[in-house]
Image (cartoon, helix red, strand yellow):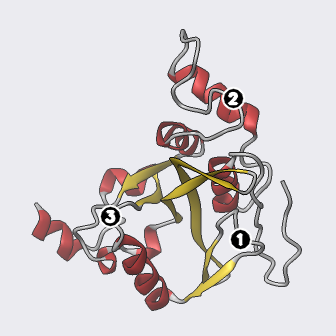
Amino acid sequence: MAMNGNSTGVYHEKQVKELCALHALNNLFQSREAFTKSELDEICQALSPHVWINPHKSFLGLGNYDVNVIMAALQRKGCEAVWFDKRKPPECLELSHIQGFILNVPSDYRFGFVLLPLKKRHWIAIRQVSGVYYNLDSKLDSPHMIGQANDLMAYLKEQLDSRDKELFVVVNQDVEEKHLWEKEETQTISR
């Protein structure tokens, strides 16, 4: 795992094996020490304790963790991952109460230069650092600056136009319990 030596001062781990969930979590919390592979493997074991092949990660042990592992890991940090309903506009989000986002996107399976006819999922962290939103995709060479709140809304709208992508809003548990991550006017409309 490498922190990119960029001038932005933004922590960014680059992709190793199939550990994009680990990288997304560490990029989200802006710390290499937020989580380790062994911690995520331990979460997998706790989720499915008596199985030969764990359904929450790659059977080869290279990573490829599922959403259950990410949600359990976030709970260890006092956070929740709230699935965002793509039928709503991103403008309904109350950004001041949101710690960041985790975007799940389809990804191709490659064996060397050969593209295999299999699909897997890739986890990407998005968060604000020093007033600027960044795409912290571990497949990028460095963090990609999205910009201010209006730029983030346009970016999220573009991402959510794809039916294959899913967005999780990361908030602390108190914000999730009180539903403060969504603007009040959209809460009353949707109820």
Quadrant hosting residue 51: top right
For residue 163, side relative to residue 27 (left or right): left
Q: Residue at x 33, y 61 (%)?
A: 84
Counting labels gives 3
Closer to viewer: mark 2 or mark 1: 2
Can you tell which mark lies on residue 60? 2
Q: Which residue is drawn at 63% across and 26% down?
A: 59
Question: Which residue position is annotated with label 3?
Answer: 163
Say which amino acid is labelled 2. Answer: Leu
| Disc 2 element | loop
Residue density around tag 1, few if under 14, some if 14–19, many if 20 or more, within 10 Å: some
Residue density around tag 3, few if under 14, some if 14–19, many if 20 or more, within 10 Å: few
| Disc 1 element | loop
Q: Residue at x 46, y 82 (%)?
A: 155
Question: Which residue position is annotated with label 1?
Answer: 140
The one nearer the camera, 56 or 31, is: 56
Say which amino acid is labelled 1. Answer: Leu
Q: How far apart are marks 1 and 3 (CA)?
A: 23 Å
* Residue positioned most to the right: 5
37, above or below 134, in the image: above
Q: How far apart are marks 3 and 2 (CA)?
A: 29 Å
